[in-house]
Image (tube, rainbow, N blue to C red):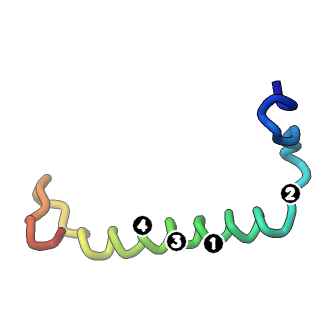
Amino acid sequence: MVDLLGSEAFDAHIEDDESYERHRHWALIVYLLLLVGYTIFAYTSKNSVHLHYL
């Protein structure tokens, strides 16, 4: 089936530098978005968020 798709088998233990850097880049972006989101929406006495914050 892998031959039909034209791709190689994936080995989780072997990564090239490009995929490692891509994963690291997106992990950093997700972390920063979570950090900013928790900082902006830290007021937790209500369960709703005002529309002008979005």
Q: Earlier in the sequence, mark 4 or mark 3?
A: 3
The CA span between labels 3 and 1 is 6 Å
Q: Are marks 2 and 3 in contact (CB under 8 Å)?
A: no
Q: Earlier in the sequence, mark 4 or mark 2?
A: 2
Please give the label number shown on residue 6: none
Residue at point 58%, 66% (across, down): 26
- Figure quadrant of residue 51: bottom left
Amino acid beneath label 4:
Leu
Classify mark 3: helix, strand or loop: helix
Q: Are marks 2 and 1 in contact (CB under 8 Å)?
A: no
Amino acid beneath label 1:
His
Q: Earlier in the sequence, mark 2 or mark 1?
A: 2
Q: Is residue 44 above or below residue 9?
A: below
| Quadrant in which the N terminus is drawn | top right
Q: Earlier in the sequence, mark 2 or mark 3?
A: 2
The CA span between labels 4 and 2 is 27 Å
Q: Are marks 3 and 1 in contact (CB under 8 Å)?
A: yes
Q: Which residue corresponds to mark 4?
A: 34
The CA span between labels 1 and 4 is 14 Å
Q: Which residue corresponds to mark 3?
A: 29
